[in-house]
Amino acid sequence: MLPLIEEEVVEVHGWITTAEYVDILAIAEMTPGPIAINSATFLGYKVAGVLGSAIATVGVVLPSFIIMSLIFVFVLRFKKSPYVNWIFKGIRPVVLGLIAAAAVSVGGNTFVDLKSVLIAILLFVLVTFRDLNPIFGIVLAGALGVIFF
Amino acid sequence: MFFSLFITFFKIGAFTFGGGYAMLPIIQKELVEIKKLISEEEFMDAIALAQASPGSVALNTSVYVGYRIKGLKGAVASTLGSVLPSFMIILLIAMYFFRFRNNDFVDSIFMGIRPAIVALILSAVYQMWKNSRKTYIKLFASIATVGLVVFTGLNPIWIVIAGAASSVIYHKLYWPFQEERER
């Protein structure tokens, strides 16, 4: 999604420069939520103020909403079909693999030194075996970041 | 129900630093484990469908999970809830703190959060694996998926399709044969 956004707003429409786009990406990565949606919100503001950011956000969310609505109706309609059941059975282990692969790609340039490895191990143990809520986990990790780095 | 679903997703949307995938372990914890609004398997199905659709995987998952819990109302609540926090935060940053990006304090917070996101995702994977009916074929499929995505950069949609197709073929061809043999 991100290269597509760059192509459209920098090359096709010339709303912002490449340098501005890089700045926007940095902010979009730091704020919670999906990066593509965040950068659309920010971009909308740069181009057309508060209204622009609202319109850009709705624009990027609406296709997802419509497509998932159609898929939900479709799945509901064919829920009893053995094929749908088999398809989901086959997909679940793949999904597990995809999520694990996401951890690898997020982790790519995350582990800069031993301290970051220790934070990851500590959080894994607390959340998995001590039932720490992940939201508190993120707050705790942010605090550890301030202490360690 | 509408409001409580909105609040839950608002909470999820407000704390998923580190991109969309960080959202998944929190949705899993809040909605599957704590509130038990959907089952582990339904959650995985939601992610599969989200992955196979265009757009952000986390947002697609939220929309679908909302539908699953409370129909169209639920989907509206989950979508608004997961989008609004970042919308408001970004608007504030865009309006007042654009320089916040070159801030050492913010950087060090993220130095701590990034490894935590990896840990949270792996913890969710571990939990989902532990709670599923384990077989060697499933284990193989999961590990092969990780390998293909990480080392070949293959588009995940093809692996999803391959998983679905091989399961349909397996159940269609192998199972009737098994039943005949047992008889």
Image: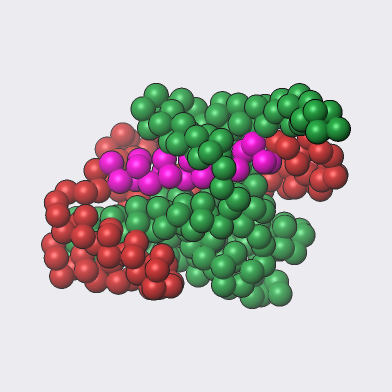
Chain colours: A red, B green
Q: Quadrant of residue B107?
A: bottom left
Report x, y in % for residue B150.
38, 32
Report x, y in % for residue A77.
85, 44
The residue positioned 77% from the left and 60% from the top of the image is B71
Image height of B132 relative to A123, above or below = above
Give whichever of A148, B33 is nearer the camera.
B33
Give yes or no for residue A92 being in the magenta stretch: yes
The region drawn magenta spans A88-108
Name the chief secondary structure element in magenta.
helix
Image height of A32 relative to A131, above or below = above
Q: How many marks?
A: 0
Give whichever of A46, B153 is nearer the camera.
B153
Give yes or no for residue A46 being in the magenta stretch: no
Relative horizontal placement of residue A35, taking residue A108 as reference (left or right): right
Relative horizontal placement of residue A74, taking residue A140 as reference (left or right): right
The residue positioned 30% from the left and 71% from the top of the image is A140
User: From where the camera sits, is residue B7 visible?
Assistant: yes
Report x, y in % for residue A21.
34, 40
The residue positioned 36% from the left and 27% from the top of the image is B151
Image height of B171 relative to A92, above or below = above
Relative horizontal placement of residue A113, taking residue B30 as reference (left or right): left
Report x, y in % for residue A5.
45, 35
User: From where the camera sits, is residue B76 visible?
Assistant: no
Q: Quadrant of the N terminus of chain B?
A: bottom right
Give whichever of A29, B176 is nearer the camera.
B176
Relative horizontal placement of residue B157, taking residue B89 as reference (left or right): right
